[in-house]
Image (cartoon, rainbow, N blue to C red):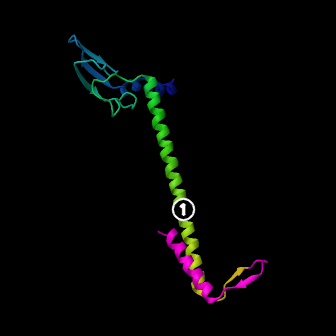
Amino acid sequence: MIKYVPLALALFILPAWAGLYKWTDENGKVHYSDQPPPGDVKQTQTLKESKSAAAAPSAGAKPGAAAKTPAEQEMEFRKRRLEAAESEAKAKKEAEAAEEKKRNCERANAQVASLQRGGRITHPGPNGEQIYMSDAEIANELLNARKVADSWCK
């Protein structure tokens, strides 16, 4: 018997979550309800705010506007969800592009540093043999590597 007490208390507490509305209709009759008033009322007053988001009017709703049908609410929800998914995909794509740019910048800077260190630098020849670069070729390659690094690291 004692284990059912919390269940009974929960059932009594649930109605306390609903909002309480008071409004006067076009005939001057005062109404009290847990549902928001229809759009064609003379005077409305919220006596108690609802704690659930479903009972609260939407932020963009105009006073006196007709309540949206469940189908319209569903369409708006799907539209918002689609827009959120698109913006998330766009942000992810931009983050990946920024990461790729960062990696390319690091590679280009490493190439510049390698060429600036000096020493003997080789490149593969037409038959796969290693050909040593002259000082003029290294200077030209360094100039090109700096241009590439500048383009990636802006």
Q: Does 145 appear in magenta?
A: yes
Instruction: Examine the image and state in which quarter residue 45 appears.
Output: top left
Name which residue lies at 57% across and 81% down: 142
Rendering coords of residue 134 (x, y %): 65, 88
Name which residue lies at 55% across and 75% down: 109
> Which residue bears the numbered disc 1?
99
Q: Which of 23 and 150 is in front in this view?
A: 150
Residue type of the residue flagged with mark 1? Glu
Rendering coords of residue 79 (x, y %): 46, 35
Report whether 39 appears left or right of 140: left
Residue found at the far top of this picture: 27
Q: Which residue range is magenta in the image?
A: 125-154
Predominant SS of the magenta segment: helix
Name which residue lies at 20% across and 12% down: 28
Q: Does 94 appear in magenta?
A: no
Q: Nearer the viewer, residue 44 or 26?
A: 26
Name which residue lies at 62% across and 84% down: 137
